[in-house]
Image (tube, rainbow, N blue to C red):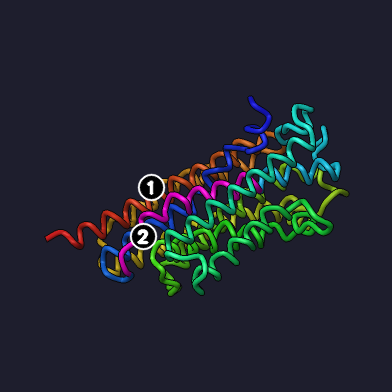
Amino acid sequence: MNPIIRSMRLRTLPLSSAGVLCGFAMALSDSAVGFVPAVRLRAFWPVLLTAVLLQVLSNMCNELGDFLRGTDSDARPGPAYSLSRGDLSVKGLRRAIFVVAGCCCVSGSVAVWLAFGSLFSLPSAATLALGAAALYAAAHYTLGSRPYGYRALGDLFVFIFFGLVSVLGSYWLCTGSWIVCPSELLPAAAVGCCCVGVLNVNNIRDMESDRGNRLTVPLLLGYRRAISYQRFLIIAAMVCFAAAAALSCLSGLGPGPLAVVVPFPFFVMHLRWISRRKGRELDSAIAVLSLTLFFTVLFFGLGLCLGAWQRLAP
């Protein structure tokens, strides 16, 4: 595999796309029933591209930061990346990071311009500032003089940017409405919990190699409590998704949103796996959780759109 492609960590991309798809689906259904103005369809693709590029940027910066600090060593049970394998130089990865960061700025600016028709209005300025914060967060998980990923703050930042900002920010760009109701906040929290869950399993897998090099939530809690924490995250995500679907049904969208529960057995499968596996064997649990989140959002979005279409049908 090309070393740059390996550093992108393509298997993580469902996480970044799930939040955007969730926000866009909620925007479509709310627009169809008249809760918000018409959806700005033209903004969807640049918003999705920006989210994916931010995920790639975060992955590349994480690899560079861990390598420079000696955390990404042979003792780490996770997959070997391009720098540790010797397939890519630090200079080459830095160059790739600058290219991806530049693409993020361009695609994000295009998304804002398509959404608001200008880069200089107050909504545009607020959105660009939020994008700049997301760019900073993506780069400083392991980079910089005080990376927050080394101080057990990664979970908080992931919940905020991969959950709340990803879902509600996409909704905002597609509708222009920043009214945060439980029907929007609950799916955003669910996506955030799942993304934190992916990070938590990753940190559980790397507990031994991280010890003495960095501080993560599993190291603070210990192995057993970290597993309990994972159960809490996944159960909270399922409850939030189910509650959001129930609210949508009560608002007149019919039973369609309840399709969100179809992938729930895979969440249960994930929880069973993490209770029985350790080290490198947890990689499969990470993959299952990422894909389960993506398909849960897909079923939820399709259910919302179906309910909105049925409500509009004569």
Query: Residue at image x 72%, y 40%?
Result: 95
Residue 168 location, x and y as percent?
A: 48, 64
Q: Which residues are magenta?
A: 37-57
Q: Which label's residue is closer to the chain start, 2 or 1?
A: 2
Q: Is residue 77 magenta?
A: no
For residue 156, say whether it is visible.
Answer: yes
Query: Residue at image x 81%, y 46%?
Result: 210
Principal secondary structure, stretch drawn in magenta: helix
Q: Which mark is residue 191?
A: none
Q: Which residue is outermost to the top?
A: 1
Q: Please tell me which residue lies in front, 75 or 33.
A: 33
Name the residue type under label 2: Arg
For residue 239, say whether it is visible.
Answer: no
Label 1 sits on residue: 262
Vertical arrangement, residue 147 with respect to residue 9, above or below: below
Quadrant for residue 89, please give it: top right
Horizontal side, residue 55 vs residue 98: left or right: left
Query: Residue at image x 63%, y 61%?
Result: 132
Residue 286 location, x and y as percent?
A: 60, 42
Q: Which mark is residue 40?
A: 2
Vertical arrangement, residue 236 with respect to residue 120, above or below: above
Residue 271 location, x and y as percent?
A: 57, 46
Q: Which residue is outermost to the left?
A: 314
Determine crowd level at label 2: few under 14, some 14-19, many 20+ residues with C-alpha closer than 10 A.
some
Horizontal side, residue 14 vs residue 115: left or right: right
Name the residue type under label 1: Val
Q: Please tell me which residue lies in front, 20 or 129.
A: 129
- Disc 2 element: loop
Q: Is residue 43 magenta?
A: yes
